[in-house]
Structure formats: C-alpha cells, structure tokens
Amino acid sequence: MGDFSHSRASQPLINPNGWRSGTRAIACLGLALTLVTFTLAHPGTARAANTTPGLSRADGYSEQRLLEVFALMARGQSREALAKAEKLVQDYPHFQLAQLVYGDLLAARTRPLQTLGDMAPDAARAGAATLADLREESKQRIGSVKERPPEGFVPSQFLKMAPRTRSAIAIDASRSRLYLFENTPTGLQLQADYYVSLGKAGVSKSQEGDQRTPLGVYFISSRLDRKTLTDFYGIGALTLNYPNMLDVRRGKSGSGIWLHGTPPDQFARAPHATDGCLVLSNPDIRTLMETTTVRNTPVVVASQLVWKSAKQLEDPAKSFATTLESWRTAKSSGDLKKTLAFYTPDFSSYGKSLDQFTPLLKAEMRASKGRNVELKDVSYFQWSDSAETMVVSFGEVSAGKRTGMHKRQYWVRSSNEWKIFFEGVH
Amino acid sequence: MQKSPRFAVCLLSLLLTSALAGKAWADDFSEVAQLSREGKFVEALAKAEVYLSSRPKDAQMRLLKGLVQRDAGKPADAISTFTRMNEDFPELPEPYNNLGVIYADQNQLDKARTAFEMALRTNPSYSTAHENLADVYGRLSSAAYNKALQIDLSNAAVAPKLALVRQIITLNPTKLSAAQLAALPKVQPAPAAPATQVAIAATKASPEPAPKAAPLPETAVKPTREPATAARKPVDDTPPTTAKSATTKAAPAPLVDTTANREVEQAVQRWATAWSDKDLKAYFAAYGRDFDPAGKQSRNAWEEERRARIEGKANISIQITDLQTLVRGNTALVKFRQNYRANSIAISSRKTLEMVRQGDNWKIVREAVGG
C-alpha cells in the first residue's frame, strides 16, 4: 500500500539531448583494435559533478584511463601510453586488462607489437583461456565506447516511465554493457555506462544452474550491503526479481540473479564469467546502489538493445495507453463481464487461476462503489521475443481516496489484442 | 659518436687526471682487481680508498670500488658508490648501467629501468645499457603478463643475466694506458659490444688517426639506408673501416668481385645461422684466429662471455637484412641490419663485420655494433 498523491505532472519520456558523452573513432593500431579518443569527460564523472556536489565518483574512471592509453598507442605515443599505463596499474593492480596492456607497452620498448597480449608463445599457451577473455573484454569495452547510442535515443523497451522512478537500467549483452539512465523532468538521460560480465553460457536463462543470464524486464527487488555478503560479491549487490511473471508462465526456473561487484583481488571479470549474475567493478556497482531504488528501478536485459528516438516510441506508447485506458474504463464502470474480457483464460495471480481471482476483482469493483478508478505513476515496458508482452506498474486509487494499491500487470498481445495474464499487488 | 660539449669537458678533466697518472696507477688498479678476484674484498676496498683519498675524482677507480662492493655482497654500498658517481659524472653511462644491474639483481625492476634509461640518456648508443634495458623491459613485461593472466611463469623463463661494465669505456680509450687496461679484471663488455669498444680495437689496429670518411666508396655499393643512419649512428660507419677507407679513398672505384661477395655473404649467413641454432662450435669457428674482441678482452674471456649469453637464451633468432658487402682482395667489409630476437626481447641494430679470407673461408676479425 502506498500514497499516490503527487504533484509532478506526467512528462515526456524522451530527452533529445540526453546523451552526454561524445566519442569518435580514430586510427587503427595494428593490434586489430579500433581505438577511441575522448572529447569530453566521462559521463559518470560529469554526472557526479552535476548531481552530487562534493562527491567524486570513481565509476567508469579506470576504463576511461585504459582507453586513453589505447588512444595514445594508436597515435604512436607509446612512451606517454606506457607512463599512463604504469600509473593505471599502480592504482588498479588487479585490473588484468590494464596489466596486459602495460605488459605490451613494456615489450613494445624492445620490439614491435603484433597483437594485444603479445607475449611469448609459452606464456600465451599457459594462460590461453584468460588471454582470450582479456582480448574479448578489450574488444567489448572499446566497441561500446566507440559506438555510442545515437544521441537522444533510448532502448525500445522504455515506453513510459513514471516520473517518480528516478532511474532505469538497460543491459546490452552483445556489448557487455550496462546503461544507467536518470529519469529527469525532460525524460530519460543516459547517466553512465559500464562494462558488465554475464553468464558463462551466455544469455536466455531458462533453468536453474544453466549459467545463463536471463533476458527480460526486471526490477531491483532488494539492496544487499557488503556487510551481509562474502568478499566474492564485492562492495554490494542489487537483486533482480528473476523469474518474473513471464518467466514463471514459461516454466523457467532458478533464482538469485544479482547485479554485484567483484572480490578485492579482481577488478573486473571476463565478459562471460558468471553463473548468471551481472557483475560490475566495485566503483560502478557502488554508483548503481546509490542511484537506484528498490522495487521501482527497471532493469532491462536484452541480447541486443534497439535504440529508438522519442518520436519512434510515441505511437506504440500511445497505442498501449489506449488499451490500458479501456481496461481502466471497464473496471470503473463496474461491468465485471466486460472487465474479465481483458484477462487471458490462463491468467494467474500468485497461483490463483482466473476463476479464483474473479471474486477478488469483483470485491475490488464493489469497494470502489462506481467511483472512477485512477491510475497513478504509470510505467510500462514492452518486451518482445517470441511473444509481445508489456510489463505495467501503477498505483490504483479510487477517485477521492488518497491511498490505493501498487499493482503490476503483465500483458500479452495475441491476434492484435492485449490481454492481462498476470495481475498482482507488489 | 656525437658528444655534447658538456660531455667533452668532463672527459677532458677525467683524461687529464688519467694522463697524469703514470704507471703507478696501473699497479693500483691491477692490485685492487687482483685482491677482489681472490675474494680479499676488505683489502681491495682499503686499497681503493687509499687511492681515492688523494684522487677522489678518479672515475675508473670509483667504478672499480663499486664493483668490488657488489662482489663483496654489499649491494647497498655499491648502489651508494654508483649513485654518487652519477652525481659527480652525470655524463658517464657506466655507473648508471651498473646501478641498474644491481637494482635488477634485487628485482627492483622499476629502479633498474630508470637507471638504464639514464645511462642511455647520457649515451644513446651505449649498447650494453640497451641490451640490459631490453632485458629489464622483458622481465617487467613478463611480470605484467603474469598479473594479467594470473599465472606464474617465473619458472618458465630464466631471468637473463645483465651485464656489468668494468671500465669506463666511454673515456677516450687511447688515453688509457695499456697497463691500466691490462690490469682490469675479467672485462665483461656486453656481448653486443658497445660502439666505443670497437673504437678501441680499431684505433689499436690502425695507428693513423681515424678519418671521418664515408666508410664505403659509393661506387662499390648502393647503400640505401646510409644517409638516414649515418647521422644517428656514426659509430657504425667509422672505426672498423679506417684502415681501408684511408687507402681506398683516393683509389678508383673497385670492380665488385661477385664470387667473393657471394662467399662472404654465405659466411655471414652461416655465422647468423650458427648463432640462431646456438651452435657454439660453428659460431666460434666463424671468427678468425686473429679475431680481436672488443674492449681489450682476451679471446677466452670473450668466448666465455658469448657462451653465457647464448646458452642463457631459450631461443635465438638472427635475421640479416640490408646486407652490403665490400670485398677488396682478401679482406671484406660487411654491413647489415641485424634483427636479434631472443626469448621475449628483440633488438634491431646495425652491425659491421670485418672479415679476412683464411684458406677457402672468410673469417670475422672484427665486429662492431651500433646502438
């Protein structure tokens, strides 16, 4: 139960000037890496300066420094690159990729480099798996910084965000990248983005122990302080509500999918290294823990994010708003039959079938005594895979009342009609 | 070698003291070295101190003192000696080099690296420091790779032995008395001999002053790299050729003896292959009986040094490019770029070999390396 009276008006979701970090590609180094140069301060630090005066954040900084080293290498300034790499490994001795690049820059003093991690063959053989992981990590980090999302675009899942929800997270598994958004009065703005490690076996978790990271729309369900955790999870964790109601409907199993940090002796993990969790460097997870809220912050995990402009999202958002409005109207009218038509035959609410749920619905409608049902703080996130679904959150309040219920619905589209297959208080 | 004026001034003062020294000094050097060889470090150091009390600015004795301290198992004292030398003779690369070797002994690789870099700042073509620095970079690089891959390869790769220098080579060698040089213990120049050591050999071989002549008559070969490299690495081009260039300068352009050229090139190739294969017998056989090791080293000492350097490497690859050959009668001058690769280090440098025909074979009698 919660209070839904609030004064902020509903705001457009999209901010055309949302993206803050400009980057451009520069020359290739012969390391088979296309490298980057920076034109602006890192988004994380820029945001920190804007929103958290006096607190200097370290999130993303180590990666920025690593990429500066790459950029110097690409320009042939290997001496400067070596000096910067040396400082970097002093500051982050457990940043393995930085150590690898540092090793290369030292080796480059005596011979030309052929590849990233250009070590003697016996060493490369002895650490072949780790070396491959580090090269992949490098590729993923560079790729994400080189190819930025188009300015003002947001992941297609974010159709509507309640103004109350401060932040949103989207993960692009193909890039090993987590994007953190701030929900501002002018819409979602990209605040920072971080390298993230995913499941050893990739994505699309379906059963317990499959070492995959689930794909879908999730919410942060709790925040775990480091005091309650072992070192393995680093400075803290945010748990996700996997399996969500769509996962349950599909018979997926498993649990304990968290966003968490790294142990003290490991700065970052390989792109595919976890049992399904999403692992970030400690400075990065710290920022997430400080900027997200339990229950509200959505976490979209996609195999590949599709970025859309505000304009592109207008139509689908309006279209679903109409559907939701017709459900609200039906429920307000007190017409049970008409309202029940919005629910799928295999509807389920925490184990209750539609038949078992119907009396509850009837009771709710009776309680409102014909008063209009109002929806506050509406958010909806679309998720499309083999099915088109919508995850909807709102506060349901009868007109004239000050309190109501936090509800979540899962909708599915079949033959051009949206139906509710889950509804529950959360 | 290009010397800055500052360098020259310092040399002059050093040379003056050396030149005034006379024979008695050579005995002192010889004695300190001998005592040290016998393990009588206390006596050796005492002797050195007595000598230095009246000639505190004697670079050679101070270098020797540092070496004795190191051999006596007092690395901290040796570090102090070489560090003070760096303050007093900032232009000399040798103290920096030896300081670097001691730091490397102690696995203080970052400090070793700085010391070798300083040695090279004083003398960019000082190849002992080049090779030592390359080894240190290799070790630092391996350490970083170990951290990156979280494996321990320390047993897999044997740390290469770094080369100490036992005399101030960068002093003008002709001014060091023969006795002084002879007194020096077990000279250990880098296997890739510093260019200046070659200068000693060349000067000894040819009494006439070394002219700064173009080393190869332009008609004999078509040097492609020469203009670019000549300015940077003049040492490559001058010393070993002095005897010839003095005479050939006025002579008409010689006809190129293609058969002899081919024989010489094959001999060079065999030498490089023997080195790559670590075939020491064949490698040493490539050098003539009258091969003159750089830096006043005896043939035996030189062979011992080379053996240690070559056998100490897990694998060696020598590639020769830009080969230029000039044959004149039974002597030949060969210049090339030597791409040396061993374990994880690689050094590309210019090299000059002077060869003579001995029977059916061409043998190396002098070897010079640029930095």
Image (tube, coloured by chain):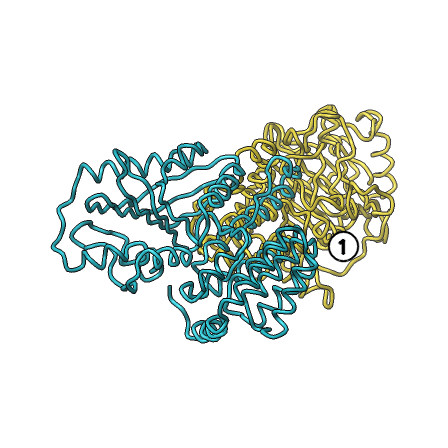
Relative placement, left or right, of A201 versus B330 is right
| In front of the other: A250 or B210 | B210
Q: In the rendering, at what x and y percent does residue A324 appear?
A: 69, 41
Q: In this orientation, does residue A26 appear?
A: no
Please tell me whether residue B154 is drawn above or below residue A87 in the rendered image.
above
Task: Tell me the residue at 66%/62% (across/down).
Answer: B45
| In front of the other: B113 or B300 | B300
**Crowd rating for badge 1 (residues with CA inside 10 Å; few <14, some 14–19, many 20+):** few
Chain B's colour is cyan
Tell me where residue A244 sits by quadrant: top right
| In front of the other: B82 or A97 | B82
Task: Tell me the residue at 57%/65% (across/down).
Answer: B61
Q: In the rendering, at what x and y percent does residue A51 appear?
A: 70, 64
Task: Tell me the residue at 67%/51% (across/down).
Answer: B39
Question: Element under label 1?
Answer: helix
Q: Can you identify the residue that label 1 sits on? A: A290
Q: Amino acid at mark 1?
A: Glu
Q: Which chain wears yellow?
A: A
Relative placement, left or right, of A227 versus B319 is right
Tell me where residue A326 sits by quadrant: top right
